[in-house]
Image (cartoon, grey):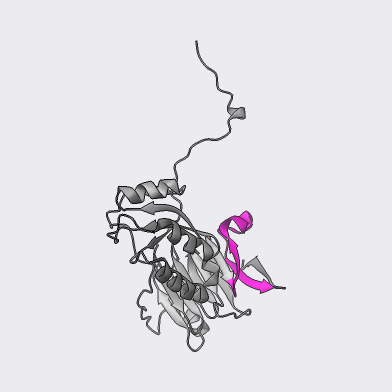
Amino acid sequence: MSLKVDRAGMAFTFKGGMLPMTVMELASADPEQIREQLSGKLSQSPAFFQHTPVVLSVEKLDEPHLALERICAVCRTHKLLPVAVRGGADPVKQSAWALGLGWFPPSDGARTRSLEEVPPVEVPATSAPEAAASVASGGRIYRGTVRSGQQVSAPDGDLVVIGAVNAGAEVLAAGSIHVYGALRGRALAGIHGDTDAGIFCRELRAELLSVAGNYKRLEDIDPHLLGSSVQVALRDAQLGITTLD
């Protein structure tokens, strides 16, 4: 006897997928030290801390009984959402499961990068003259792809990226951000509160857009704008996106 399944009545389906995820690699198990550093990071890029899901990597810690519940509470206080733990001994795995978190085995390190400031790339004066002309005093030009796990910033002016920004990467600027390629990662302009700043890119695929702390995530962006050349700016305290075509 065959069993027929009414697909129209199915509640869910399982699908494999690769979702961008930020890994928070812990070098300390002290919740107060983590709290102090998160507070400093929050003042630098507040839009990043908007219920961002993170995986807590404890691979560098040699503490089988770390205060995982307190660490998660500190993260949530700073608007980070721990969804899983990577690495750790069996007690850590059991604690993660007890807290409703997932658990991943330790990585081989081959595909992970630290989300730290990458060194500046010098751009010859003859290349990308239009981009160079648009950078005000204190700005920065970065030539090449900003890869997953990298962060490129211009803390005192505009940032011009002559290349793409990959998923999982982050670009920040005190002024405006210009991306001469696809923008798939996170872009935070006006990080010190400049409401006149904007974001300009040739292909919009961003995970997060922010101007002066006002932000939109990918799911908030009109699907018709994805893949288009756009400008992002504040209008009446709302983040607006319009095409450049």
Q: Which quadrant would residue 201 be assigned to in this image?
A: bottom right
Q: Which quadrant would residue 190 be assigned to in this image?
A: bottom right
Picture layout, residue 219 above or below residue 2: below
Residue 138 picture location, percent across and down: 47, 87
**Side (left or right) of 5 relative to 96:** right
Picture layout, residue 39 above or below residue 54: below
Residue 33 picture location, percent across and down: 40, 71
Picture layout, residue 143 above or below residue 59: below
Q: Nearer the viewer, residue 181 or 55?
A: 55
Residue 98 picture location, percent across and down: 43, 46
Is 243 covered by the magenta stretch? no
Q: Residue at x 51, y 86 (%)?
A: 136
Q: Residue furthest right?
A: 236
**Side (left or right) of 243 relative to 59:** right
Q: Which residues are magenta?
A: 211-236
- Picture mark count: 0
Q: Nearer the viewer, residue 13 or 61?
A: 61
Residue 20 picture location, percent across and down: 45, 55
Q: Nearer the viewer, residue 161 or 167?
A: 167
| Quadrant of the snapshot with the C terminus | bottom right
Picture layout, residue 190 above or below residue 184: below
Is 212 covered by the magenta stretch? yes
Question: Is residue 217 visible from the viewing direction of this image?
Answer: yes
Question: Is residue 79 visible from the viewing direction of this image?
Answer: no
